């Protein structure tokens, strides 16, 4: 192609349009299978997974996503993103497992909503969890993430409340048993778990050395056990 100046070059505006991204397109770091991964997935604008109908799809897709080399052990659906705790045999297993998960979830959610296009707004972000304390912090953050966001907005939940849009109903590391506070949460507590049982030491034994998690703990607050008020 010749430019108006007669110099061969690329036409301004030509080629595939760039999209904004918060996760750089660099080679992801390798990690050992013993290290759980905290994965964050940003949703496309306008997507809201916090409805019972769409949550049922999330459950179904998670339940069919487990393989010998990759397993989702905990999750939460927030207003514009998802958190996952994942065991994977390595970087390649994690990437392939998340690609399967994202593709299946996008197809089913788009079909349910009658929409087309990407369900996720960005590449996934993954962070290796290396110590028992770090794992406990992330489990509390994922399972009680709705409390964290509510506190940021000045809202306070009852201490007995748990997030039904997470894997909280099937988590075995609570310091006290969860009690249903609605007919739907009663049903959830009786439903089979969609997440996989953890197998690595950090997720089964290690983090518990720092204490079980109080359902009322608010991630990011100094008074971690301060109850949320309505």
Image (cartoon, helix red, strand yellow):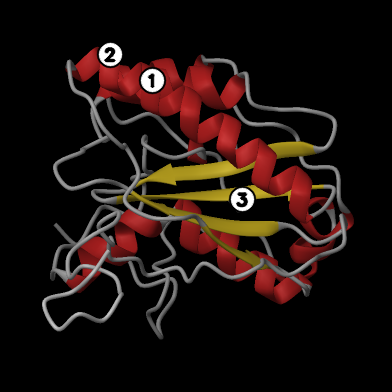
Q: Residue at x 30, y 75 (%)?
A: 8
Q: Which mark is residue 107?
A: 1
Mark 1 lies on a secondary structure that is helix
Residue hosting label 3: 85
Q: Is residue 5 visible?
A: yes
Against 221, residue 70 (above or below) is above
Front in this rendered view, residue 7 or 16: 7
Against 174, residue 116 (above or below) is above
Give x and y (percent) for residue 130. 77, 73
Give x and y (percent) for residue 95. 66, 47
2 or 3: tag closer to the N-terminus: 3
Mark 3 lies on a secondary structure that is strand
Front in this rendered view, residue 45 or 199: 45
Q: Residue at x 59, y 70 (%)?
A: 26
Front in this rendered view, residue 57 or 147: 57
Whole-number angstrom distance, CA of label 3 to CA of label 1: 22 Å
Residue hosting label 2: 111
């Amino acid at each position: 192609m010749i430019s108006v100046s007669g110099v061969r070059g690329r036409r301004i505006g030509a080629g595939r349009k760039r999209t904004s991204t918060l996760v750089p397109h660099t080679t992801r770091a390798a990690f050992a299978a013993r290290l759980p991964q905290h994965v964050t997935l940003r949703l496309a604008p306008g997507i809201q997974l916090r409805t019972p109908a769409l949550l049922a799809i999330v459950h179904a897709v998670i339940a069919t996503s487990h393989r010998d080399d990759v397993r989702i052990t905990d999750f939460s659906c927030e207003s514009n993103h998802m958190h996952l705790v994942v065991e994977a045999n390595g970087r390649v297993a994690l990437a392939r497992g998340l690609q399967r998960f994202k593709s299946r979830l996008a197809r089913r959610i788009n079909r349910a909503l009658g929409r087309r296009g990407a369900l996720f707004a960005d590449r996934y972000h993954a962070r290796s969890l290396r110590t028992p304390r770090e794992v406990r912090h992330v489990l509390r953050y994922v399972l009680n993430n709705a409390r964290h966001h509510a506190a940021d907005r000045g809202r306070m939940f009852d201490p007995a409340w748990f997030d039904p849009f997470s894997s909280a109903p099937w988590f075995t590391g609570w310091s006290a048993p969860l009690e249903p506070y609605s007919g739907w949460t009663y049903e959830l507590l009786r439903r089979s778990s969609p997440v996989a049982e953890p197998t690595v030491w950090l997720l089964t034994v290690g983090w518990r050395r720092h204490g079980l998690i109080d359902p009322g703990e608010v991630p990011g607050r100094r008074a971690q056990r301060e109850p949320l008020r309505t």
